[in-house]
Amino acid sequence: MTTPFPLLRLPHLVLMPILEQMDFMERIALSINSKRARMFLKLLKMKCEHINLRLEDNRVEMKVFFDNSEELKVDMYTDRYKINLRYGNDHIFWWSGTLSPIDYVLPIMDVTHCKSIKELTFPRVSDYDPKYDAHIPLLTKLKKIDEVIVENTTSWCFSPHSPLLKVLRIIFPVSSAVTISDQVGKPKYLREVFKGNFDAVSVSLPWEIEGFSLNDWRIANAKTLKLDLRMTNVWSFMGMANVKSLGGSDFKVEDVNRYFKLWMKKKCNPRLENLIVRTRENVTKDLLLKGLNAVQVPIRTDVKLLRSDEEITFEFDITRADGRRATIRISNLQIVYFYVWPICQNQSSFMRRFSSFSSFYNSCIEHFK
């Protein structure tokens, strides 16, 4: 009969060197099984770069990314309580009895000093019976989520009484951004997302969308707004999947112009900082800038664009009565960029304005990629 070794009862000066000699998987296993051990393991500063989660019916996939290019992958199954761990070339299977995903995700986040989830993804949403009940205890414990991503969904999944929307309402208050990467054909189901207090909202819309009007666009409350228009398989083939686009049978360049006029009158989203629009029509500067008193400015060349074959053909500044300024850029690919300048002192200095605009613009492009 083997007598258990009282590892955690050792003096601190003895215990810490032992923990330092453990390999990574041993540390993770110990952190999951003991709160006291986790307290000591945190002193080793096993910091990760970020953590991603994917929730799919009875499965939770957790990926922990470290700065040494290594990755810890944890697959959890809520119906069988089967845990599959992989770190680098190490592959371990655990059959852990009655532990739920919350008993793995939170301890690993704690011991790797991770305060938020970078991406929380719903990869495939079942239309009729998505099994989210087992995930709710975990979702309610997450304190911060950088981005929620919903893939392969339908309009029904966002209807008022759908299981998915009920789950999303749990995590929306702690989420910074929402990306709905499949086509949702009924904008009325997305109004709750548009009205949310998010930093960024990205929604894919089908080419022939019904009922999407300027009013749906006006209610958006996000700082960064992406509305991606997709024709099945066509835009992906052309490399346009990541281009911000807004269109449909009843959305035209005139609507973009009307939105800019609403911004000039302070009658639309007061939080808006950037927007990129791709229309179905040829974008002419006369039609787009009608009534805006736009002033043409030199085209800046140090700002990143969405595509390598894209170039800016015109660039204009517009200014509201309160002095707030925005820049409108028109590219050769029928893409309109709209960026609101940050409020800062001494904006009359051209070099300061140039540096501020370039940094802001490039940060937006990096977010959209």
Image: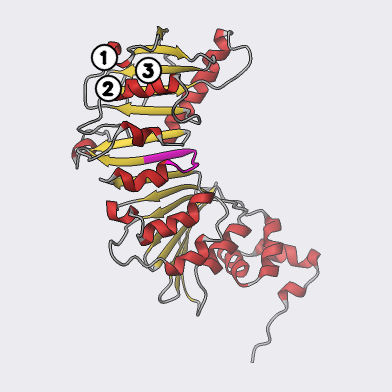
Q: Which mark's residue is nearer the viewer, 3 or 2?
A: 2
Q: Per the image, is 199 magenta?
A: yes
Amino acid under label 3?
Arg
Q: For the residue marked with disc 1, what is the amino acid? A: Thr
Residue 201 sits above or below residue 347 on the image: below
Q: Callout 2: helix, strand or loop? A: helix
Q: Nearer the viewer, mark 3 or mark 1?
A: 1
Indicate the position of residue 174 as horizontal and vertical percent values.
Answer: 54, 50
Task: Report the magenta residues as a range.
Answer: 195-202
For marks 1 and 2 on the same chain, the one whose residue lies earlier in the sequence: 2
Residue at x 46% of width, y 43% of height: 196
Amino acid, disc 2 = Val
Can you identify the residue that label 1 sits on?
284
From the image, tell me which residue sits under label 3: 329
The structure residue drawn at horizontal position 55% and vertical position 50%, both measured from the top left corner, is: 144
Which quadrant of the view contains residue 364? Answer: top left
Closer to the eye: label 1 or 2: 2
Q: Secondary structure at mark 1?
A: loop
Verify whether residue 122 appears in magenta: no
Q: Magenta stretch: dominant SS? A: loop
Nearer the observer, 313 or 281: 281
- Specify whether residue 91 is in view: no
Are the residues flagged by discs 1 and 2 in contact, CB closer than 8 Å? yes
